Image: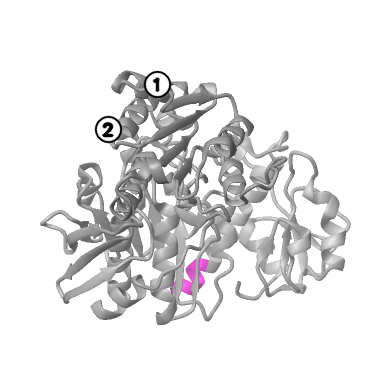
Amino acid sequence: MIALSLAEIAEIVGGRLHRAQGTETVRAGVEFDSRKLAEGGLFVALPGERVDGHSFAARAVRSGAAGVLAAREVDAPSVLVPPLAEGEAHARSVALAGDTDGSGAAVLAALGKLARHVVTELSAGELTVVGVTGSSGKTSTKDLIAQLLEPLGPTVAPPGSFNNELGHPWTALRADAGTRHLVLELSARGPGHIAELAAVAPPRIGVVLNVGSAHVGEFGSREGIARTKGELVEALPPEGLAVLNLDDPLVAAMADRTSARVVGVGEHPAASVRAAEVTVDEQARPSFRLVTPRGEAAVRLPLHGEHQVGNALAAAAVALELGASVDEVAARLGAVQHRSERRMEVGTSPDGITVLNDSYNANPESVRAGLKALASMSRGRREEQADREEHGRRSWAVLGVMGELGADSVHAHDEIGRLAVRLNINRLVVVGEDAAAMHQGASHEGSWGEESVLVPDADAAIALLREELRAGDVVLVKASKVARLWRVADAVLAGGAAVSGGAA
């Protein structure tokens, strides 16, 4: 963060000083957790489900904070933010846990104004803001972009999926005068959300990956989702760049919604940054020929799942725009690492069981991608050992509910169950009644008996797997966060260790 006095912050957010001279200077980033504050940071007091951050204001300053951003008077140097005018609150802020009086929404609105000021100041210099959105793949692509840009200059990107009205300004305020690239992930649960986040940290480069079924219950249709995802390219300046996935017609159509230059990516023949000759190995790791206007290069991704090709192409387009050569992009893509947990992580238990842990979240598109990766990995194992049943090499899909699908939920879950049969997955374990249509679909698609089973919860899934898994089996674990199925992945990876819960 650039250095700002509390008096300057008060002016930026339209607040007033309290117990402060105004000369107190914030030189580090902002934090919602007083235990994580750096010396000279700004403590942001937010109400919570169990505790209120205002109660920790004095402790935060004693620990080194320069001041506090608060909605009411606290016993510490602070900037008190004004209450929101009627209708001003961010649509998602009203759902902030513990925010019964709108004070949390007011603090978040002020934090957004502060981030906007800092990013605008830095963008007048050498900072480039890159925004990424899409129904799936945002976090993985954000991580890829950051790794490709880091050799070109200091880069800031959020950890995990810190992509809403809390995480967005928090990440933006990590940028300082030395930062060259700010890579941000933009999520949405309704119309206008992407536009609001883009206003907090105006992007010069916008990446739209896909339009799927995630949150279709809130948007009503994929076309409604597309209208909101396209708010990112509408926010780009004429001198900016829109990176659009031409393999998705709803994304390709967004070219008409931006004044920025457009670069198409994908396997589509019209894509400027294109993948040709795509193959996957026995671990579902894709390889392809990267084709660009500046030349071609071979790429072998160390990530799992053919869907990672599209993510890599989007990252490549951004890196090429910001100065990397084709050969540099190819080499860096071949050396990328997982940075966000529970997203297509592959591990092996002491018992010799391979786990594909993609349990962070789920929607129909990402579950299909996970099942295809599982099928590829199990095919590779069949090539190693022809008689996999005799030697215990089987593919298992442990799947839970895909949330926020609205009226399409039953059909979407049914289709996933049928796909598991068509991909020749050996065993399907469906977790929870909310996902029961997966079991129903699998049972109707083929003459399955015990190949598909419905269990009530994660503990039941763990018990079943401990009893039936054998060395060499490959297990995919995937569901929306509410199912907490990472407990299953953790239990399998631990081998015989007992599991008594799991951290969120």
> Looking at the image, can residue 485 be seen?
yes
Position in image of residue 67 (x %, y %): 77, 65
Q: Nearer the viewer, residue 463 or 324?
A: 463
Q: Secondary structure at mark 1?
A: loop
Evaluate if marks 2 and 1 touch, with contact meaning CB atoms under 8 Å apart: no
Q: Residue at x 74, y 64 (%)?
A: 36
Give the quarter of the figure containing the C terminus.
top right
Q: Is residue 16 within the magenta segment?
A: no
Q: Residue at x 18, y 55 (%)?
A: 267
Label 2 crowd (10 A; few <14 / some 14-19 / many >=20)? few
Q: Residue at x 84, y 68 (%)?
A: 63
Give the quarter of the figure containing the N terminus.
bottom right
> Looking at the image, can residue 89 be seen?
no
Label 1 crowd (10 A; few <14 / some 14-19 / many >=20)? few
Check the image and report above or below for 376 versus 227: below
Question: Where residue 482 is drawn, which disc sits there?
Answer: none
Distance CA(mark 2)–CA(mark 1): 15 Å
| Mark 2, residue position | 422
Start and end of the magenta stretch? Answer: 119-124
| Mark 1, residue position | 449
Position in image of residue 167 (x %, y %): 57, 54
> What amino acid type should be assigned to the residue bearing mark 2?
Arg
> What amino acid type should be assigned to the residue bearing mark 1?
Gly
**Colour treatment of the image:** one colour
Check the image and report above or below for 217 versus 186: above
Give the foreground label among 2 and 1.
1
Q: Nearer the viewer, residue 460 or 502?
A: 460
